[in-house]
Image (cartoon, rainbow, N blue to C red):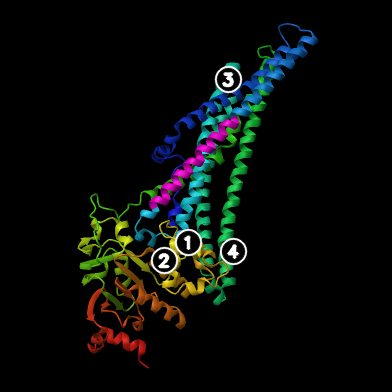
């Protein structure tokens, strides 16, 4: 069975010092709050030791005194005093515990905020090649589930383990102080318990790995089926896909039940050894009380301390999984954060003066994957204001030219220049500010029509936004909507036709007013005849006084351009006007005849 999202297999250790050191860098800004939380934790741990001591003192001095006799009134007053002190201690412990948990959660939420912000900022700076190989679902999991796992570690895992360690150390010392012989009897059960805990730790680690892998398979399968639901229903695959999901789901259920079995079994075994320790204490400690070597109060206090001693051991399995999950999540998060930013601004960028719009490719070689060249030695020059169309069969490298001009990728060989400046020597934002792009499948964001045109750019006024829509013939359908420009748009433009989304993309490009060129990537495909006429009219307007590159399979849309560049297998094979290329009897002629021959 294939494993989806191999990255989700990462588990690592329950504690990895290298990763923990890196996680602590996110804690440093909140050192004061963490220090206060640790101080409160220490106080809470000490206060938890007071209760059994008060119980033992009350029994030995007021319930079953052995050294002196007190009147019933004195005993009652003494017990009342002990009860009041006990209540004050419990109240103080409750307040300190509340403050401790509150501060820890504040720190955890702030660390999650910082980490999410850092990841989102880093993702926006990564080259598109990263997103070509990483599914959206995986990246969403990094920003949500994995960051939440870290919050659980900071609030319930690492600090809780420290609390447990302090409790165990404090109780151990107290037990030895009360009666070291009885303490040794108690510790007889610890070696076999630790051996059993070690076995369960290994078993639960392997089970945890199995659960994570199976959950990743379910998530991947569900995401794939939802995205392709139209194909599933069209080809009547519902039952077969359900059977496949049922198989994955049952496999996940099986591993989850096994996990529950481990938890229950380990808890039961721990309870057994705890009860066994109590039995030994009652047997040996009771005998010491009968001999007068130990007071009854000390024995009762001792039993309460023993219960607190075994409590953190019972929680071992849960906290181990929290740590393991956090370490695995950290490793996956850091894998994203460590992804190198390959498209970077130069340390001393060149500035564009008055942009004219000249574009030049100098012997450009480009490949998405090493050795698989998409563009092979492309050299061309586009004059300012020139309208150029690039045509060719699928896979010829047309769209790659668009991506390279926008500097979504960097070329491996050669150079691309705008107004004589290598775009790698300029800031990315300076290059892209002058590039307007309309893609074949324009992306529409959730929000309003207006927000999709201006993309929340404050410099674009309502008047300029409406003028842009009118200029590209988008206003005619926008004004028919119930809310007009304030009409809510659902995710990815659901409810809008392909043509309407195209017109919105044109309006967006015009609103931002690209100064040097407008790039159109098959912008008139997949629309009806009426909408195509509107778009073609918008294209003609957009190309006025702009350096324009049009990528299109539909040759009817490019007859009026100044020059047509024909590409084939990553190379330029022909150049010329529509009429010149038809007379050449070359690749363009064959493309034309393929589309229009009856």
Mark closer to the observer (4, 2): 2
Tell me where residue 181 appears, x and y as whole percent: 59, 18
User: Relative to the observer, which residue lies in front, 31 or 154?
Assistant: 31
Kindly report the distance in space between the C-alpha atoms of the residues bearing marks 3 and 2. Answer: 73 Å
Q: Which residue lies furthest to the right in this view?
A: 72
Kindly report the distance in space between the C-alpha atoms of the residues bearing marks 3 and 1. Answer: 66 Å
Tell me where residue 286 appears, x and y as whole percent: 69, 19
Q: Looking at the image, tell me whether mark 3 or mark 2 is earlier in sequence order.
A: 3
Please give the range of residues in magenta.
Answer: 97-122
Kindly report the distance in space between the C-alpha atoms of the residues bearing marks 2 and 1. Answer: 10 Å
Q: Looking at the image, tell me whether mark 4 or mark 2 is earlier in sequence order.
A: 4
Location of mark 2 (residue)? 508
Kindly report the distance in space between the C-alpha atoms of the residues bearing marks 4 and 3. Answer: 54 Å
Picture quadrant where residue 128 is located:
bottom left
Kindly report the distance in space between the C-alpha atoms of the residues bearing marks 1 and 4. Answer: 42 Å
Q: Looking at the image, tell me whether mark 1 or mark 4 is earlier in sequence order.
A: 4
Regarding mark 1 in the picture, which secondary structure is present there? helix
Tell me where residue 44 appears, x and y as whole percent: 58, 26
- Residue 268 visible in the displayed image: yes
Location of mark 1 (residue)? 451
* Numbered tag placed on residue 174 in the rendering: 3
Q: Looking at the image, tell me whether mark 2 or mark 1 is earlier in sequence order.
A: 1
């Amino acid at each position: 069975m294939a494993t989806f999202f191999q990255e989700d297999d990462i588990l690592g250790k329950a504690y990895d010092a290298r990763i923990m050191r890196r996680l602590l860098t996110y804690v440093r800004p909140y050192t004061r709050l963490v220090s206060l939380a640790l101080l409160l934790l220490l106080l809470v741990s000490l206060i938890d030791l007071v209760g059994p001591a008060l119980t033992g003192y009350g029994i030995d001095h007021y319930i079953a005194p052995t050294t002196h006799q007190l009147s019933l009134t004195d005993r009652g007053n003494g017990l009342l005093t002990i009860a009041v002190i006990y209540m004050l201690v419990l109240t103080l412990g409750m307040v300190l515990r509340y403050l401790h948990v509150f501060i820890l959660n504040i720190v955890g939420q702030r660390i999650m905020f910082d980490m999410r912000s850092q990841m989102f900022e880093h993702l926006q700076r990564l080259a598109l090649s990263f997103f070509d190989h990483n599914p959206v679902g995986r990246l969403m999991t990094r920003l949500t589930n994995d960051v939440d796992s870290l919050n659980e570690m900071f609030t319930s895992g690492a600090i809780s383990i420290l609390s447990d360690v302090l409790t165990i150390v404090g109780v151990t010392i107290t037990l030895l102080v009360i009666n070291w012989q009885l303490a040794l009897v108690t510790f007889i059960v610890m070696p076999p318990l630790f051996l059993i805990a070690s076995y369960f730790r290994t078993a639960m680690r392997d089970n945890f790995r199995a659960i994570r892998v199976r959950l990743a398979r379910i998530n991947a399968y569900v995401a794939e089926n939802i995205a392709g639901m139209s194909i599933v229903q069209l080809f009547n695959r519902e039952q077969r896909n359900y059977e496949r999901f049922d198989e994955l789901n049952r496999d996940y259920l099986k591993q989850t039940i096994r996990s529950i079995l481990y938890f229950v079994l380990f808890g039961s075994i721990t309870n057994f050894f705890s009860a066994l320790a109590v039995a030994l204490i009652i047997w040996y400690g009771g005998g010491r009380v009968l001999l007068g070597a130990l007071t009854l109060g000390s024995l009762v206090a001792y039993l309460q301390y023993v219960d607190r001693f075994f409590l953190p051991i019972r929680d071992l399995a849960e906290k181990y999984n929290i740590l393991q999950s956090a370490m695995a999540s950290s490793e996956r998060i850091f894998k994203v954060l460590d992804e190198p930013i390959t498209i970077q601004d130069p340390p001393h960028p060149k500035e564009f003066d008055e942009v004219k719009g000249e574009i030049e490719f100098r012997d450009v070689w480009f490949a998405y994957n090493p050795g698989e060249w998409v563009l092979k030695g492309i050299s061309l020059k586009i004059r300012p204001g020139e309208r150029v169309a690039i045509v060719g069969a699928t896979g010829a490298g047309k769209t790659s030219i668009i991506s390279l001009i926008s500097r979504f990728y960097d070329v491996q060989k050669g150079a691309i220049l705008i107004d004589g400046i290598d775009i790698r020597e300029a800031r990315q934002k300076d290059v892209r500010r002058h590039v307007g792009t309309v893609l074949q499948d324009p992306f529409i964001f959730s929000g309003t029509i207006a927000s999709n045109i201006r993309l929340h750019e404050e410099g674009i006024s309502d008047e300029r936004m409406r003028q842009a829509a009118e200029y590209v013939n988008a206003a005619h359908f926008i004004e028919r909507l119930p809310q007009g420009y304030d009409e809510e748009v659902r995710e990815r433009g659901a409810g809008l036709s392909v043509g309407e989304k195209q017109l919105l993309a044109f309006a967006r490009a015009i609103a931002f007013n690209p100064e040097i060129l407008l790039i159109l990537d098959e912008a008139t495909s997949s629309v009806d005849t009426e909408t195509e006429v509107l778009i073609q009219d918008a294209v003609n307007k957009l190309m006025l006084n702009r350096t324009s590159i049009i990528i299109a399979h539909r040759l009817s849309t490019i007859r009026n351009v100044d020059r047509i560049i024909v590409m084939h297998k990553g190379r330029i094979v022909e150049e010329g006007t529509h009429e010149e290329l038809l007379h050449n009897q070359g690749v363009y002629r064959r493309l034309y005849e393929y589309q229009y021959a009856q």
